[in-house]
Amino acid sequence: MSARWLHRWVGLVLGGWFLLLGLSGAVLVYWHALEAAQLPRPVAGEHMPMQPLFEAAARHMRDIPWRIFPADEHRDHAVAIFQTDDGRRMVHLDPTTGAVQATLPWRGAAVHWVYDFHANALAGRTGKLLVGLTALPLLIGLAVGLRLWLKRGAVPLRESLLPAAGLRGRRRLSSWHRSIGIWAFGPLLLATGSGLPVSFPETTRLLLQPLLAPAPVFQVPAAKGAGEIDLDGAVARALAALPGWRLGWAEPPGDDGDPEWLIVLLRQTHEWPSGRAAAWVNARTGRLEEVRLPDGVDHARAWLRAVHEGRVFGTAHRWSVIASGIAMMVLAGLGPLLWLRSRRRVPAAA
């Protein structure tokens, strides 16, 4: 089995899937903006505290939200998630006025369908596993393609770096395939390699945990609470314990008698990607009960996810991810065309 044979058949068998992954991945770089485009624009102005938004969502659905997210740099609206008999529902609230601007099924926007397709092929946990496994032949195809490019024989270097003018037929297709492939190799390798931990988070933890630092131990101050506390009070209590963090989302006390707000915190907006912290605040006493800080694996997985989504190195990073997705689509299309051209060639007469 030659390297060329392996490269060809990886592309022919999985090329259609790679094309769809490239297309969906390129779209998802700006998925928050695409989601916001389907919703009314919120009123400009200072954002309301979280408790009135929480109450507005509860009034609208006549139920207590399961989880609520604030508006942030990715999301123009505050979003409350409800568990209903018909599945989860998303209530989008104007963060300035508290008005309900949309109520959608969980992941009901069109871009959510693209997200689920890219993440799990619309097949849940099994699909997520299969999507992750297809990264392995893609990595093999990239490695073998690089080897073939380096051993390009009599093909001029310029023709391997840039599509050459004046070529026809199979040689023109081959020139395009070689030149696009070498320029896209780095971004595709980065996108594919960083996507593996997203598909296999627990395996990533098992591999990295012995190598990375454990979570710091947070000593909760032995202070008495100030009495009954609402969402804003719980958030303030958590942020006072962890300066430099911000609210990611919150979950209210449960119906099972659990009296604690769960406050999930993220690092400040423009800091390096990191794992999430969690704080539990007693709604009855206002006392901070527990804080869990992220460990080295949490930080690594957050960073790798941000790399995969194009969120680390600014606009240039986003556009490189988009370009790599488009390149994957083009390469997946050029490969079968090259194969068909080679099949059509008539052997010379004896």
Image (cartoon, rainbow, N blue to C red):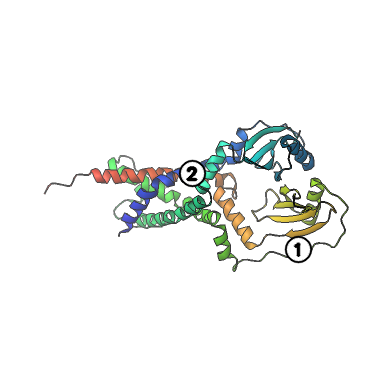
Residue drawn 72% across the image and 55% down it:
278
Q: Position of residue 3 (x, y in %)?
A: 33, 58
Residue drawn 35% across the image and 46% down it:
335
Q: Position of residue 175 (x, y in %)?
A: 34, 46
Q: Nearer the viewer, mark 2 or mark 1?
A: 1
Identity, as a three-letter code, of the amino acid under mark 2: Ala
Whether residue 76 is visible, yes or no, is: no
Which comes before the other along the chain, label 2 or label 1?
1
Q: Residue furthest left?
A: 350
Q: Secondary structure at mark 2?
A: helix
The answer to whether residue 244 is left or right of residue 168 is: right
- Tag count in the figure? 2
Identity, as a three-letter code, of the amino acid under mark 1: Phe
Gap between marks 2 and 1, in whole Å?
43 Å
**Picture quarter with the N terminus:** bottom left
Q: Secondary structure at mark 1?
A: loop
Q: Position of residue 134 (x, y in %)?
A: 45, 53
Whether residue 205 is visible, yes or no, is: yes
Classify 10 Å Cα crowding around label 1: few (below 14), some (14-19), many (20 and above). few
Q: Toward the viewer: 16 or 244?
A: 16
Above or below for 145 versus 116: below
The answer to whether residue 272 is left or right of residue 308 is: right
What residue sits right under mark 2 in the picture? Answer: 323
* Residue 5: image tag: none
Q: Position of residue 116 (x, y in %)?
A: 54, 44
The answer to whether residue 318 is left or right of residue 158 is: right
What residue sits right under mark 1 in the picture? Answer: 218
Residue drawn 34% across the image and 43% down it:
164
Quarter of the view holding residue 7: bottom left
Q: Toward the viewer: 142 or 172?
A: 142
